[in-house]
Image (cartoon, rainbow, N blue to C red):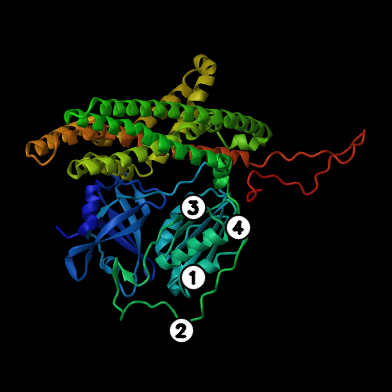
Amino acid sequence: MAKRGFQGAVMRGFGARVHDAVVTGTEQLAPHFLRVRFSSTTLFDDADPGPTAYLRFWVPDPDDPDTEHQRGYTFSEADTEEGTFAVDFVLHEPAGPASVWAKHAEPGSTISITSFGSKQFTVPDELPAGYLLIGDSASIPAINSIIDVLPHDVAVEVYLEQHDDADLLIPMSDHPLMNTHWVPRLGPTSLAAAIEDRDWSNWKAWAGTESKALKHLRTRLRDDFGFPKSEVYAQAYWFHGRAMGTYRSNNTAEPEPTIDEAPPAPQPTRSSRGSWQAESGGKLIGTLRNTFVAAGALQALITLIQLAPFVLLTELARRMLDGAPESQLWTIGIWAIGLMGAGTLLAAALSFWLHTVDAQFERGLRTQLLSKLAKLPLGWFDDRDSGQVKRVVQDDTLSLHYLVTHAVTDAVAAVVAPVAVLIYLFTVDWRLALLMFVPILVYVVTTVIMVVQSGNKTAQAMRWADRMSSEAGAYLEGQPVIRVFGGAAASTFRARLREYIEFLDGWQRPFSNKKSLIDLATRPATFLLLITVTGTALITSGSMQPTALLPFLFLGTTFGARLLGLGYGLGGLRGGMLAARRIGVVLDEPELDTRESDSAPPRHASSVEFDRVCFSYRPVSP
């Protein structure tokens, strides 16, 4: 078996499956751009070849066939039923291992591949004003896959960095509203400087360029144009002067042009910053920012107060065994009861205050939202189904309730409590405290594996839920017609429901073992077993005092619940922010344009005149 190093071992540990692909043919699309076609009988059991989805190829090193390098390539073609696909290789000079392999690929050649970590581009329900796509020859396959799925009424601006005259010959997908700009590379800043100085409000940016050029692109998009982080996808597709992760020798590497060798790269000009609907959520809850900060600080203090009685009870038990005076025992016991009561009262007061704030906030928000819906044009409702409207009016406002009243406090408590407990337990006995990390590590690694293997399925599940909510509503509303005239609508609904169940089953069933492992790792009984077995061994060997076991029995067994609380708290924060964004976008929608007439109409109008009248739901598509 070829050596794949630490990276290969990590990928296998996270559940990456390696498949064999057989070359079925090649096609020279440009002098330095080669399409290689493959077949694989097992790849599409794992891979979903959507837009920008990619494969990791394990390419043999030309100088050491026993060593393989990992390199990602985007799907250019795919037929999941036939098990065939294609990827495009840029044939670099001097050639790296991938270029060398591609040049010599012929029908019958085999290579190992995996789809581990692949992410897809998805067109959101709320379309942006346009898409800014930035790349070069290496990322053209990904850019083409994006262009192919974009609606024809969305503006597209493409900026491509030119490294070779033959780059212009690489085939590009077509789009009716697309403008393509080729930018000769004069240095790492030239591509960023070439981006048009304009208002990019409500555009999304996708960038897959060389690493140094990407660094300057990020800065320009953020600082000059104001692109929020959520509206930019930026990933380096290759590194200038490297071949497959290895630096090329100084004799063969293509140097960056200097001032003496080429004209200096143009400097970007300062542009007026745009505004984005993606920032609407932040503005919506901006009035609550001070409330969140105060609630987080108070919750941290309350969490420490609630933990203090357990520490005191441990000290109480230790002094009882040591035969301390009764007065000391009463003092410690009273302090423990007092702090326990204070923690309970403070937690109740904090919860009451946050619920009061939330009631006032939601009342104003619902009033504002319903008033806004009454003023939106009918086209806004035509572009959305009932499920999407219901989600904004009902589900998203409920998500904001959890965000305001519980998410921040739950997340803070879930972070502060384990950290404080671990610090205390390490002061008692570092060996037993270190053991607490075993189930924690199992929980974290298993959760990360599930997230990575889920890929885009989480977003797909959200879209499925919206779709089924709409179809269920339509199915119930149509019951009088369905019962009288037959079941066409009913059979359609049942088919959709079956597809949804199959999607959930295919997504979640492979995780059943991992979920069982997480459940086992976070159970109090698991921590209790580790503590008692290891603690007993340490006590019987004389290396730990029996009373040192008490803090672990009081506090160590609660780690599992605290880990789950952290997941729920962070999930609630994320869900609440997404809900705030969707509500904020609706509140920022332009309303119907109404105005009073300047003069009274004639009593006997005899004609209607249209003068320079136009109509559109989207500004770029009249």
Question: Left or right: where does residue 200 sit relative to residue 59?
Answer: right
Q: Which mark is residue 229?
A: 3
Q: Amino acid under label 3? A: Lys
User: Could you tell me residue 182's position as x and y percent?
Assistant: 51, 68
The CA distance from mark 1 to mark 3 is: 20 Å
The CA distance from mark 1 to mark 4 is: 20 Å
Q: Residue furthest right?
A: 603
Q: CA distance from mark 1 to mark 2?
A: 16 Å
Image height of 277 relative to 25, above or below: above
Q: Residue at x 67, y 45 (%)?
A: 616
**Callout 2 amino acid:** Glu
Q: Earlier in the sequence, mark 1 or mark 4?
A: 1
Precedes in sequence: disc 1 or disc 3: 1
Are dots 2 and 4 in contact, CB under 8 Å? no
SS for callout 1: loop
Q: Is residue 496 above or below residue 109?
A: above
Mark 4 residue type: Arg
Do the residues under discs 3 and 4 have CB atoms within 8 angstroms?
no
Direction from residue 512 to residue 149 in the image, left or right: right
